[in-house]
Image (cartoon, helix red, strand yellow):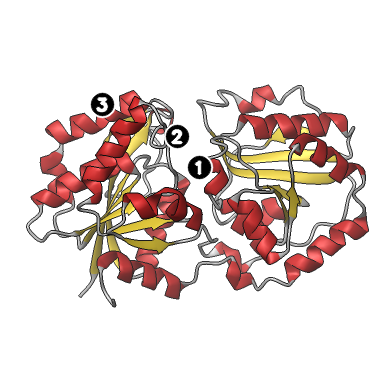
């Protein structure tokens, strides 16, 4: 008997959503998808031809998103319940979708497993103020009916999820590289200078941009910085224009995952793996996609000491892990960097088996079994 997963997402056009759908399908599940669309991405193709759009929302506008959830609860539940009627499990990607998924689950006669996919902890959820108390109250009520929590970093469990969802099973699904393209690893880039740093993926950190801009401007052509991916329009309304006047730094637009990974990582020496967007909280606890992508393609990651990414790389003894003050450490690193230093970094990276960075079909099957409550 097949496994059926209903997947409720906050942004149908998020590339990570398409990846997760592919993981579920590779693991043997049929997937019914429903969720919101971002206002700046309407009109593009959806990740599944039969995905149900619940309306349009806006990045970084939490009140508007809460209103959109309320409108679904008030007027869209009939159609949504029919769309997800035969699911063995409902997977909700973040807290707002968990509100909707819990309501759907109560309406379905077969009582599907309720799964919370939490890959980020929103700063308001962790706030000491009144808004934080409200969000945690919502989370506590929902936690009573959650069977399984999926997250991507053990720090999220240690710092919050393990307490908030104490009665739920925890499933760690790292942000490993997944898809048909990864069989091709990037060709090793000849040593610089110029040393090229790539910042790829979700681009949302203003401090990272400022650090890299200062480095590129100070090094006079010795360091080049290339950005590829999907900028947050709330942080960078027009990233390409912002970088027009910055020498040795450019934004080259989005990339196709996983098809373009070998090309983009093969064109740089280092992968920027720092994030200060929610420093001290979410950004300090995550293990991002670019960490695994750079590991697989043997591109040297640059990370911050004292956070989960830095600890992860420290355990593997790879990468460039820098202490604060980061700006000073960056300039010192590239001022004295030699081809021999870089080759030593590559030798350490070569020592890590490539399967450490890749999500295998067998792992996909294990994920689906756990989500659907099979094989336990």
Q: Are marks 2 and 1 in contact (CB under 8 Å)?
A: yes
231 or 154, which is in the foreground? 154
Indicate the position of residue 15 as horizontal and vertical percent values.
Answer: 47, 47
Q: Which residue is mark 1?
A: 282
Q: Secondary structure at mark 3?
A: helix
Q: Secondary structure at mark 1?
A: helix
Is 186 left, or right, of 129 in this rendering? right
- Report, in whole angstroms, how far the alpha carbon at label 2 lies from the one at label 1: 7 Å
Q: Are marks 1 and 3 in contact (CB under 8 Å)?
A: no
Is 184 left, or right, of 128 in this rendering? right
Is 111 left, or right, of 122 in this rendering? left
Q: How packed is label 2: few (under 14 Cα within 10 Å), some, or many (20 or more)?
A: few
* Looking at the image, residue 7 lies above or below residue 139: below
Residue 227, numbered circle:
none
Residue occupying image coordinates x 77% and y 67%: 348
Q: Which residue is mark 2?
A: 123
- The nearer-to-camera label among 1 and 3 is 1
Sequence-earlier tag: 2 or 1: 2
- Report, in whole angstroms, how far the alpha carbon at label 1 lies from the one at label 3: 24 Å
Residue occupying image coordinates x 72% and y 62%: 298
Residue furthest toward the bottom?
A: 375
Sequence-earlier tag: 3 or 2: 3
For the N terminus, which image quadrant? bottom left
- Report, in whole angstroms, how far the alpha carbon at label 3 lies from the one at label 2: 19 Å
Sequence-earlier tag: 1 or 3: 3
141 or 108, which is in the foreground? 141
Indicate the position of residue 356 as horizontal and vertical percent values.
Answer: 59, 69
Residue 67, numbered circle:
3
Q: Are marks 3 and 2 in contact (CB under 8 Å)?
A: no
Is 251 left, or right, of 132 in this rendering? right
């Amino acid at each position: 008997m097949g496994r059926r997963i209903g997947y409720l997402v906050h942004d149908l056009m998020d590339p990570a959503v398409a990846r997760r759908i592919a993981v579920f399908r590779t693991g043997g599940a049929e997937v019914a998808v429903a969720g919101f669309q971002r206002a700046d991405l309407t009109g593009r193709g959806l990740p599944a031809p039969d995905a149900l759009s619940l309306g349009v929302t806006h990045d970084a506008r939490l009140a508007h998103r809460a209103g959109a959830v309320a409108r679904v609860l008030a007027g869209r539940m009939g159609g949504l319940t029919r769309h997800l009627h035969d699911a063995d499990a409902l997977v909700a990607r973040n807290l707002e979708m968990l509100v909707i998924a819990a309501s759907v689950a109560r309406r379905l006669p077969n009582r599907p497993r309720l799964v919370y996919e939490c890959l980020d902890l929103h700063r308001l959820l962790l706030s000491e103020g009144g808004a934080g108390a409200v969000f945690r109250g919502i989370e506590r009520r929902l936690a009573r009916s959650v069977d399984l929590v999926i997250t991507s970093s053990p720090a999220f469990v240690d710092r919050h999820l393990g307490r908030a969802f104490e009665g739920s099973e925890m499933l760690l699904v790292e942000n490993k590289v997944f898809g048909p393209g990864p069989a091709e690893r990037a060709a090793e880039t000849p040593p610089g200078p110029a040393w090229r740093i790539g910042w790829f993926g979700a681009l949302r950190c203003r401090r990272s941009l400022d650090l890299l801009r200062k480095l590129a401007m100070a090094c006079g052509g010795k360091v080049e910085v290339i950005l590829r991916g999907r900028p947050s329009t709330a942080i960078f309304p027009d990233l390409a224009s912002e970088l027009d006047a910055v020498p040795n730094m450019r934004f080259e637009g989005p990339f196709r995952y996983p098809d373009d990974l070998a090309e983009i990582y093969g064109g740089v020496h280092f992968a920027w793996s720092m994030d200060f967007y929610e420093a001290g909280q979410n950004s300090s606890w995550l293990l991002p996609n670019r960490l695994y992508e750079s590991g697989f393609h043997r591109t040297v990651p640059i990370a911050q000491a004292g956070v989960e990414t830095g600890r992860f790389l420290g355990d593997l003894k790879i990468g460039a892990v820098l202490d604060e003050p980061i700006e000073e450490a960056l300039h010192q690193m590239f001022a004295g960097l030699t081809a021999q230093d870089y080759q030593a970094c590559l030798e350490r990276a070569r020592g890590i088996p490539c399967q450490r960075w890749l999500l295998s079909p067998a792992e996909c099957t294990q994920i689906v079994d756990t989500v659907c409550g099979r094989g336990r």
